[in-house]
Amino acid sequence: EPEVTQTPSHQVTQMGQEVILRCVPISNHLYFYWYRQILGQKVEFLVSFYNNEISEKSEIFDDQFSVERPDGSNFTLKIRSTKLEDSAMYFCASSESGGGGPLGGVTQYFGPGTRLLVL
Amino acid sequence: DQQVKQNSPSLSVQEGRISILNCDYTNSMFDYFLWYKKYPAEGPTFLISISSIKDKNEDGRFTVFLNKSAKHLSLHIVPSQPGDSAVYFCAAHTNRDDKIIFGKGTRLHILP
């Protein structure tokens, strides 16, 4: 069964450093997302991406964050200058069709996550 | 901003019995509701969804019920099995901005 994969599984970085989290969405999916879960809190939406541009972003997704689809398979989240409060599990997700698709196929499939620890 | 609420942080159910997980929401613009299951150190795994125009969807042991007038949905698992022990997230999708909003989760323990 196809699945979303993420690398690395764990990342430790110093405050102020840049990190890039990588995701390979399910191959025929067209809509891509990043979510995060701070320890003990709920999963929160960060950004959605379709047709090589951001569709929607939350207030968490400030200028320090960026996303890119550098090739036909990878989808990356970059944090330019990490802060302590960026420590969290970051989940990538993909869906075949976003909101309003003909079959209403809004189900998003999640990767296993990258645990980011900022020291 | 708790648009999706799961008021029970945990639930314990005997193996073989029915597990009922509850969820309330506030936004009448949600178009789909989803349940995800999460094991420690893994990502959320999609279980079942329901369109806002339906009141029931069934898939094997899992049934989701939607009561729009009460803004309430529930997930029924019957019979409960040991492998069902996990955290269950209720989630809602908004067509307007294509994102999923999660509840805080309910930890389900299936007792032998």
Image: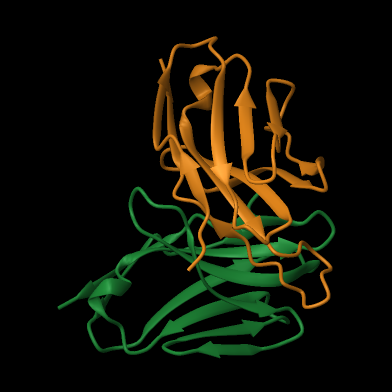
All told, the count of numbered labels is 0
Q: Position of residue A55 (x, y in %)?
A: 82, 46
Image quadrant holding the C terminus of chain A, namely top left
Foreground of the two, A113 or B13: A113
- Residue B49 rendering spot, x and y as whole percentages: 61, 76
Q: Is residue A102 above or below residue A32?
A: below
A2 on left or right of A76: left
Q: Residue at x 39, y 52 (%)?
A: B42
Identify the residue at horizontal 46%, vertical 59% (top origin). B105
What is the letter of the orange chain? Answer: A
Q: Is residue B71 left or right of residue B38?
A: right
Residue at the farthest left position: B112
Q: How is the image coloured?
A: by chain
Compared across the picture, whether A31 is left or right of B49 comes to right
Q: Position of residue B65 (x, y in %)?
A: 58, 85
Letter of the green chain: B
Residue B19 to residue A100: above or below: below
Q: Nearer the viewer, residue B64 or A48?
A: A48
> Which residue is drawn at the image coordinates 23% and 75% (left, top)?
B82
Snapshot quadrant of residue A39 = top left
Residue under the image location 76 percent in, 61 percent down: A98
In this picture, is A13 found above or below B93? above
Q: Is residue A115 left or right of residue B29?
A: left
Query: What percent of the width, then of the height, locates residue B87?
Result: 39, 61
Say which quarter of the image contains residue A102. Answer: bottom right
Identify the residue at the far front of this view: A72
